[in-house]
């Protein structure tokens, strides 16, 4: 018999210790987060380029007219603020005073600090807290303090939190309302794997969370400040030994993947239907994201095409050196002095014969072979960049004086803003990035979803509270 959860007090209100994960571009909006809060939990509005609405309630298309990347970047910030404000207001109204509404931002998104200031200034009294990850958000606590809201950093290790605490958070300790531990091997979206961790060797989350609690205690943080377990959480009876565990202190649970398949979830029907067909292993932890972070998404044809592109890759030198003694004669037009190994020359000729006739340079002194159509699309997407990230490996945009990373744009990656906007608004699921946690395959076998049943958010929250 599942011993059950007890309500907690969060920002002066009693809520269930259940958090809705705030999922990127329009995959979480006011409908899902407002319903989650109305069910007594903490709903999370994604403040990452959220949708805004015209006076008739129609979604405002995010069209960019600026001639330069900097101009388009400013447009993007305005869209982001207007959208997040609209979503927060609608979610707050839906919650009808129940639960709580958080917002979620990615620290590495373009203009993150501008967006946070803009949203919090226009939603005073509506937002309870801010969750923030994808980077090291040192200024999160400072910004939260200006608006009197809680902050909940998203980390994947005790070491990361220690750095944040020592440098900044200890100065605003009273507003730290939780620390989100996002498991880097199990969570969907961007993951905080460090260079010392092997993406192919998942680690048990328990000792990592226990270490995080030890770091928090060392900093003088009370055990009543919860750690939010995020990533891989499906049914709570599988985590029962975490509840009321003195080694871990207060624990909350975040659900990112399961809320995707609800009546209120804003993702298109085709996406929901695909979730019910996934098998174990269909979600891939990969490093194609232009952020430079690992991320987890469904291994659909879009992701497979990126895998194939990187596999059609050879190293080159600009003069004959060692094994690089063979001049490349395909894929480079009239350009000269690309020297490769004998084996790679043979590979290049085979790819050329198969239609991958264009070789594109990467920042790592390699060439990837693509079709002419692929190269045309890659070049266009790079040229259309609107600076959605603080630094983008795909377009070489950076939010600095030169608006450049100083590195060659990387054709092995993709425009993440374009694909996430497209799939969230009805674009083909096979042709876009489809984020999901690694437990998504459980939709197919969980009896709760039998016969294609799609619950309301309230039905899902009620089900989760039973342990199942």
Image (cartoon, rainbow, N blue to C red):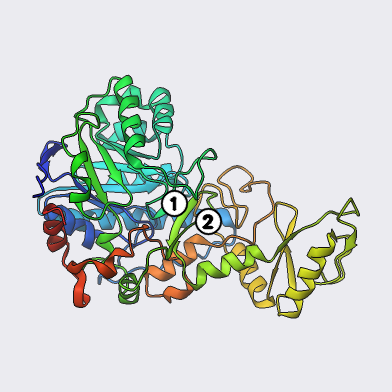
Front residue of 70 and 454: 454
- The part of the image, by quadrant, that contains residue 146 is top left
Residue 416 x/y as whole percent: 50, 60
Whether residue 263 is visible here, answered yes or no, is no
- The part of the image, by quadrant, that contains residue 56 is bottom left
Whether residue 382 is visible here, answered yes or no, is yes
Q: Is residue 216 above or below residue 50?
A: above
- Compared across the picture, whether 350 is left or right of 267 comes to right
Q: Is residue 181 above or below residue 67?
A: above
Residue 398 x/y as whole percent: 58, 47
- Compared across the picture, whether 282 is left or right of 55 comes to right
Q: Is residue 176 above or below residue 417?
A: above
- The part of the image, by quadrant, that contains residue 183 is top left
> In terms of secondary structure, where does tag 2 sit?
loop
Residue at (18% x, 56% y) in the render? 36
Residue 289 tag number: 2
Q: Is residue 235 above or below residue 160?
A: below
Residue at (46% x, 41% y) in the render? 135
Residue 28 tag number: none
Residue at (34% x, 52% y) in the render? 47
Q: Which residue is mark 1?
A: 190
Residue 393 x/y as whole percent: 60, 53
Residue 169 x/y as whole percent: 35, 27
First of labels 2, 1 by sequence position: 1
- Compared across the picture, whether 361 is left or right of 329 comes to left
Label 2 close to label 1 by CB (< 8 Å):
yes
């Amino acid at each position: 018999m599942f011993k059950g959860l007890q309500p907690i007090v969060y920002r002066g209100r009693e809520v269930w210790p259940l958090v809705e994960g705030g999922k990127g571009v329009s995959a979480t909006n006011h409908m899902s987060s407002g319903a989650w809060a109305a069910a007594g939990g903490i709903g999370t509005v994604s403040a990452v380029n959220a949708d805004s609405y015209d006076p008739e309630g129609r979604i405002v298309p995010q069209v960019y007219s600026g001639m330069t990347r900097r101009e388009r970047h400013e447009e993007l910030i305005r869209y982001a603020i207007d959208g997040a404000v609209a979503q927060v207001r609608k979610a707050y109204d839906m919650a009808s005073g129940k639960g709580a509404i958080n917002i979620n931002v990615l620290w590495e998104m373009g203009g993150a600090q501008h967006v946070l200031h803009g949203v919090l200034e226009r939603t005073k009294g509506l937002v309870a807290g801010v969750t923030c990850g994808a980077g090291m958000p040192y200024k999160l606590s400072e910004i939260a303090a200006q608006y009197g809201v809680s902050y909940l950093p998203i980390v994947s290790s005790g070491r990361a939190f220690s750095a944040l605490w020592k440098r900044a958070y200890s100065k605003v300790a009273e507003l730290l309302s939780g620390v989100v531990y996002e498991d880097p091997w199990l969570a969907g979206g961007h993951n905080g794997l460090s260079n010392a961790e092997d993406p192919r060797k998942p680690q048990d989350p328990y000792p990592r969370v226990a270490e995080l609690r030890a770091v928090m205690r060392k900093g003088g943080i009370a055990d009543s400040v919860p750690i939010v377990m995020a990533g891989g959480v499906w049914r709570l009876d599988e985590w029962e030994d975490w509840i009321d565990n003195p080694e871990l202190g207060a624990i909350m649970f975040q659900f990112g993947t399961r809320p995707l398949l609800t009546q209120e979830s804003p993702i298109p029907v085709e996406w929901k239907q695909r979730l019910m067909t996934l098998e174990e292993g269909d979600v891939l932890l990969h490093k194609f994201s232009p952020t430079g972070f690992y991320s987890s998404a469904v291994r659909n044809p879009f992701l497979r095409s990126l895998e194939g592109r990187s596999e059609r890759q050879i190293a080159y030198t600009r003069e004959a050196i060692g094994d690089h003694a063979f001049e490349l004669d395909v894929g480079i037009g009239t350009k000269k002095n690309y020297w490769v190994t004998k084996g790679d020359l043979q590979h290049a000729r085979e790819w050329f014969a198969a239609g991958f006739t264009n070789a594109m340079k990467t920042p790592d002194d390699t060439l990837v072979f693509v079709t002419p159509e692929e190269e045309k699309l890659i070049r266009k997407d790079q040229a259309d960049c609107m600076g959605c990230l603080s630094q983008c490996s795909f377009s070489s945009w950076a939010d600095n004086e030169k608006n450049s990373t100083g590195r060659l744009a990387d054709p092995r990656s993709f425009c993440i803003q374009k694909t996430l906007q497209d799939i969230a608004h009805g674009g083909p699921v096979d042709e876009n990035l489809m984020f999901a946690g690694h437990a998504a395959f459980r939709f197919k076998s969980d009896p709760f979803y039998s016969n294609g049943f799609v619950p309301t958010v309230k039905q899902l929250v009620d089900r989760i509270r039973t342990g199942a």
